[in-house]
Image (cartoon, rainbow, N blue to C red):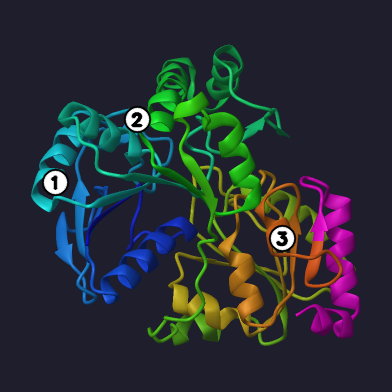
Amino acid sequence: MRLLLVSDSYPPLIGGATRATQILARDLSARGHDVCVATSWQAGAPERETDDHGVRVRRLHGIVTRLHWLSADSFRRIPPPFPDPETTIRFARLIRRVRPDVIHCYGWMTYSCLLALFIARSRIPLIVSARDYGNVCALRTLLRQDEVCDGPAPVKCLTCARHEYGLPKAALAVGGVLGARRPLARRATLVHSVSRYVDSVMRRDLSSGRQSPAFAVVPDYRPGGETAEPDAAVLARLPSEPYILFVGALRRVKGVEELIAAYELLDGDRPPLVLIGTRAPDSPTEFPDGVHVFRDVPYSTVLAAWDGALFGVAPSTLPEPLGNVVHEAMSRGRPVIGTTPGGHADMITDGVTGRLVPPRDVTALAAAMRELVASPSTTERMG
């Protein structure tokens, strides 16, 4: 079978959704399928390559991604939440060459692919992968004034997005996301969500009467398969004593500010806090004593770092779609403190495999951390 996988990002970029696309591509290739990945062009990455698993990768230019100043993230090219004219043309050419039997899309690249399919009047089955809320929320966070949004509406979404993007960008983003909901719902064969929570949001906000797609929940994480050697230089810089570990983008919505505040509430004889993640425009620039920061760490090294951790902390302030970091920690026998609502509840049983706390509740987060630090037997039992 010929398969086209579409994703906003792909290695060498780092991230949970990025890695999920790569794992899917390589697994399908190993099963004998002809797999091509289409992703957004990134500076320093080849436009065309075939990896050692036989997966072809095509990084597509677009008008918006060429204008780097338009991006809200200065560290990577992010496709726009509407069809990019150049990317749409490139998709049309790629689809003609690849002749896929199925197209699997994640993220805002979906919109350019969708328009290319409409123009060609193609009926190739389209699977939409909901690994975040980007197809129903212009911010991708499902947050409105730090609270979980109860559903999209033009004025409400524009008011919310304006604070993040400014009015001109907000109008384009909201118009693109809301305007594409009905065409996407009618054209998609299946919407695949990574957690029950995301599935409930997609069913609420992407359904379109009798022409709604089918919906399914399939978590992204697959253990094993990592053969690269950890970076010994990074591991040597980790604290020698057991530490608290955070892995993820160093962003506000990942709860980094709340985590640091909670850490400072712990007793003076507290274990080190290790932050492993990627930079973002809103990443903190200063950290208190006891906090060790590692950026852009390879996945094999992240897994090895879990072996030295007491427990993990994933204090997202948004309803986390899934949080592969929780699976990673548990695969190494470590409990995790997560937040609810969101996909963490699919993996963490409160008091059994970790703790669930409300988002942005620094006091509750500090209490959960203090409990696991003070009771190694509890930490070991949960892991």
Q: Amino acid at mark 1?
A: Leu
Label 3 and label 2: CA atoms lie apart by 33 Å
Looking at the picture, tell me which residue is in the foreground, 171 or 239: 171
To which residue does mark 2 refer? 70
Residue 380 percent location from the top left of the image: 80, 84
Image vertical order of residue 120 relative to residue 158, above or below:
below
Relative side of 273 to 107, left or right: right
Observer able to see residue 314: no
Q: Amino acid at mark 2?
A: Leu
Q: Is residue 347 magenta?
A: no
To which residue does mark 1 refer? 94
Relative side of 34 to 336, left or right: left
Observer able to see residue 130: yes
To which residue does mark 3 refer? 288
Q: Is residue 380 magenta?
A: yes
Dot 1 surroundings within 10 Å: few (below 14), some, or many (20 or more)?
Answer: some
Please provide the residue range marked out in magenta: 356-383
Of the numbered discs in the image, which one, if any, rests on residue 225? none
Mark found first going from the N terminus, 3 or 1: 1
Look at the numbered disc 1 and give the secondary structure of its residue. Answer: helix
Label 1 and label 2: CA atoms lie apart by 25 Å
Query: How many callouts does the rendering have?
Result: 3
Residue 95 percent location from the top left of the image: 15, 45
Residue 84 percent location from the top left of the image: 25, 30
Relative side of 323 to 346, left or right: left
